[in-house]
Image (cartoon, grey):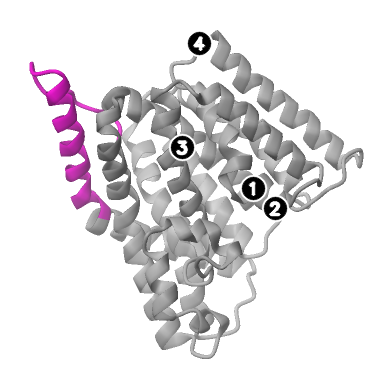
């Protein structure tokens, strides 16, 4: 699934450079697959390592060790680029102690639309705030078997947003109540039984039908409702099929650099903008992506990989407590 994750990160990057496909924002379509993947991976992680109420805090620590190293690195690199190279810009106006302080817990970034944090220092990081909200909820949903109720309630919120009864952008794409069921589609794909597969497949089919209705004008097109439904329809089968593939080191490497590309492409764009007016033609897009790939390799091996040992040690410690016979080794990062 690593190559797919990198493709998704690239789609997010090119969408931020103003590229669309058939009138659709490819970044939004890609983000939905990220949510589905996250649901699958978090369910796997909890089932294998943290499926006990007393281990929920350790799960949160595991996720912090995953998100924070590269987030902090690129957040402060972006602050430096903006401060030194982009004075007098809207980005520079957000470089206040208050904005920096409230951004560091990550969760407030997911509520930037309510003024909880800024959105210009590291724009893609709003979705990390959404991820963190999901991380806070998912152990309880799994341990206390509440996924079904949460799924139904989330679908109701999403449909209200998709049909325009509430804000489509916020409740149909950016906030957890309306997208939780997308995470849970991925959750149901982990060691799927008939019920889980039926829920995930039925959701993908319903999303495809809604997408067709939107594009045909039967349902009014609202901010991102076409992209989100397309993302569900494409993402569920893609993730299901990709989870069946065997491990491959090249695929693992591509997945390893995907998080950095997702975070750093705006930093590269800000850096280039400081030296000449940037029109994102094919050459500039290729330049941004090349620099983003290279920088991501540096940050993975120099920043994230040293912390990876701590995550694996944390999981081994939990499994040793559960099974005194010896450590359980994990094939997942």
Q: CA distance from mark 2 to mark 3?
A: 21 Å
Residue at the location (59% across, 48% down)? 175
Q: Is residue 328 magenta?
A: yes
Percent position (x, y) of residue 198?
Answer: 62, 14
Q: CA distance from mark 1 to mark 3?
A: 15 Å
Q: CA distance from mark 4 to mark 1?
A: 28 Å
Residue at the location (66% across, 52% down)? 170
Residue at the location (60% across, 59% down)? 14
Name the residue nearer the viewer: 332 or 183: 183
Precedes in sequence: disc 4 or disc 1: 1
- Read off the residue under disc 3: 38
| Circle 4 or circle 2, nearest the eye | 2
Say if mark 4 contacts mark 3, CB within 8 Å.
no
- Observer able to see residue 248: yes
Percent position (x, y) of residue 300?
Answer: 30, 54
- Observer able to see residue 241: no
- Residue numbers of the magenta segment: 304-333
- Read off the residue under disc 2: 169
| Circle 1 or circle 3, nearest the eye | 1
Percent position (x, y) of residue 164?
Answer: 81, 47
- Read off the residue under disc 4: 193
Q: Residues within 10 Å of mark 2 (few under 14, many from 20)?
A: some
Name the residue nearer the viewer: 307 or 274: 307
Q: Residues within 10 Å of mark 1 (few under 14, many from 20)?
A: many
Name the residue nearer the viewer: 202 or 333: 202
Precedes in sequence: disc 2 or disc 3: 3
Residue 254, placed above or below residue 199: below
Number of the label disc, if any, that sits on residue 173: 1
């Amino acid at each position: 699934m690593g190559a797919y994750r990198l493709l998704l990160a690239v789609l997010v990057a090119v969408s931020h450079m103003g590229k669309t496909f058939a009138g659709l924002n490819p970044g939004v379509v890609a983000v939905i697959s990220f949510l589905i993947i996250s649901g699958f991976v978090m369910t796997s992680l909890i089932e294998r390592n943290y499926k006990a109420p007393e281990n929920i805090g350790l799960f949160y620590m595991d996720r912090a060790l995953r998100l924070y190293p590269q987030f902090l690195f690129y957040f402060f690199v972006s602050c430096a680029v903006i401060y030194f190279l982009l004075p007098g810009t809207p980005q520079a106006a957000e470089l206040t102690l208050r904005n920096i302080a409230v951004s560091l817990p990550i969760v407030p970034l997911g509520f930037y639309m309510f003024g909880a944090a800024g959105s210009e220092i590291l724009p893609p990081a709003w979705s990390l705030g959404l991820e963190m909200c999901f991380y806070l909820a998912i152990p309880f949903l799994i341990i206390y078997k509440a996924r079904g109720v949460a799924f139904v309630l989330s679908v109701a919120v999403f449909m209200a947003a998709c049909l325009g009864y509430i804000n489509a952008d916020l409740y149909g794409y950016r906030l957890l109540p309306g997208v939780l069921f997308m995470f849970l589609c991925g959750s149901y794909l982990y060691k799927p039984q008939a019920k889980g597969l039926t829920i995930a497949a039925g959701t993908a089919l319903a999303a495809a039908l809604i997408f067709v209705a939107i594009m045909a004008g039967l349902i009014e097109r609202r901010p991102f409702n076409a992209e989100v439904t397309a993302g569900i329809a494409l993402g569920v089968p893609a993730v299901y099929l990709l989870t069946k593939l065997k491990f491959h080191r090249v695929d693992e490497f591509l997945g390893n650099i995907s998080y950095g590309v997702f975070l750093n492409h705006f930093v590269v764009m800000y850096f280039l903008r400081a030296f000449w007016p940037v029109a994102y033609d094919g050459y500039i897009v290729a330049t941004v992506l090349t620099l983003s790939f290279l920088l991501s390799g540096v940050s993975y091996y120099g920043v994230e990989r040293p912390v990876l040992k701590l995550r694996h040690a944390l999981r081994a410690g939990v499994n040793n407590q559960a099974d005194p016979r010896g450590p359980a080794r994990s094939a997942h990062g």
